[in-house]
Amino acid sequence: MELVNLKDSSERVSFAQAVKQGIGKHQGLFFMEKVEPFSAAEVESLLNMGLVERSQKILRHLIGPDELPQLESIVADAFNFDVKLAPADDKTYCLQLFLGPTLAFKDFGARFMARVLSSIIGDSKCTILTATSGDTGAAVAAAFYQQPKINVVVLYPQGMISPLQESLIATLGENIHAVEVKAPFDSCQDLVKTAFDDQELRTEVGLNSANSINISRLLAQVCYYFEAVAQLPAEKREHVVFSVPCGNFGNITAGLIAKALGLKARFVIACNANDTVPRYLQSGNWEPHKTIATISNAMDISRPNNWPRVEALCKMMGWSLQDFDFGSVDDETTRENMRALYQKTGYINEPHAAVAHKVLCDHLKDGEVGIFLGTAHPAKFKEEVDQTLGLELPLPKALADRCQLPLQKKVLEPDFATLKSYMLDDLKL
């Protein structure tokens, strides 16, 4: 599998090199230049397989026959939890991606990446530096916890992730280092990008990233779009619409790769008040605003890092950006959608899924089957869900156990020199 730097096409790397390197020159993202689709018969065959076997075949097809001989065993180990397509109302389903160890969809990408990296790192030093707006940090921390020769530094925005999310990130210790940054997520992401441009730091600590910057994360997420369609009755598979709650736009990039592979589906972009992409699709002007804190905090990103991959894939496949349906939803509308669905069917959404459900309902056409992505367990946003729906959600054991542990974190200003000093001098990575 050859991948190209979207900012410098002279930089071409293998899949393994892209995983180890994370990001290319000039902060360019690695991406494929072509996607070889499955035939219709192959897609049909894939949809009749189980999640693990199907995912092994999809990822082998994407990565190629000559790389990563351990791929099949990595997939079996990484995808060892369920995915459930649950009816939400008479027209829509929720793809519940929160049944893994940290109760979020990012368990897929993080667990896959951790195992890939561990298998290819050899004797090299490796430090994962990642920024999180909520769920990435928890999934990465759990996936890499106690992995030999790999340290993890997780940056998260002060006051902009839930207490439960913070507990999942900052209570592990050992090789997991939690850093609370006194700034919004975009500033955390900027620190990561700056770090990757600092050759001394990259070399000294073996820098890598587990954000959706890393191509391994995206490829793992391709698999559950096929799983969603596979769980539908055969007669409902022809007109599927996915509504994806979008923050950094990695999840929808993975969905569009699935489409490029031959999965029949169209995609709806669902954003909260951080609506850079919806405004761009309307006006043609890329004008990020200051990040707004919302109740769907994992989507509080005004400069989505993966958008260049979306545009590159659309150009590759001859798709028009104007073909996307999209919408943005404010907090009060999000709450109204949560209440309306609960009162109608008893289905409990958390804010991110509610954003996706609302935008899906706004754009679902007659004869279509709507699937919105449930990216996190409602209990991860217990305070908001309880208050909005008048409930008292019980905490799953994975969360309840973590909440009892003390936080182990460092608080830093959003200053790269301070972060670099912390990593080189304080942690001595």
Image: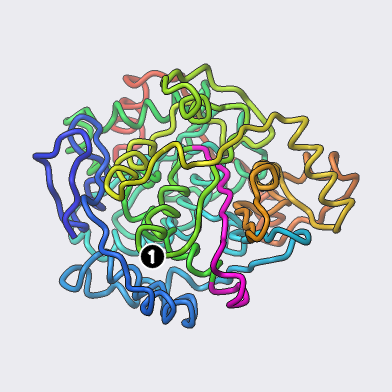
Compared to residue 344, the image places residue 112 above or below, namely below
Residue pictured at 36% horizontal, 74% vertical: 56
Does any portion of residue 411 appear in the rendered image?
A: no
Number of on-image labels: 1
Give 102 or 31, whichever is nearer the viewer.
31
> Colour scheme of this structure image?
rainbow
Residue 429 rendering spot, x and y as whole percentages: 29, 41
Is residue 243 highlighted in magenta? yes
Residue pictured at 89% horizontal, 51% vertical: 343
Compared to residue 193, the image places residue 66 above or below, namely below
Quarter of image, res 147: bottom left
Residue 216 rendering spot, x and y as whole percentages: 33, 56
In the rendered structure, the answer to whether residue 418 lies left or right of residue 381 reads left
Does any portion of residue 126 appear in the rendered image?
A: yes
Residue 41 rendering spot, x and y as whole percentages: 38, 79
Q: Secondary structure at mark 1?
A: loop
Give 19 or 237, whichever is nearer the viewer.
237
Residue pictured at 65% horizontal, 60% vertical: 367
In the rendered structure, the answer to whether residue 62 lies left or right of residue 96 reads left
Residue 243 rendering spot, x and y as whole percentages: 58, 49
| Kind of residue at badge 1 | Gly
Residue tagged by mark 1? 262
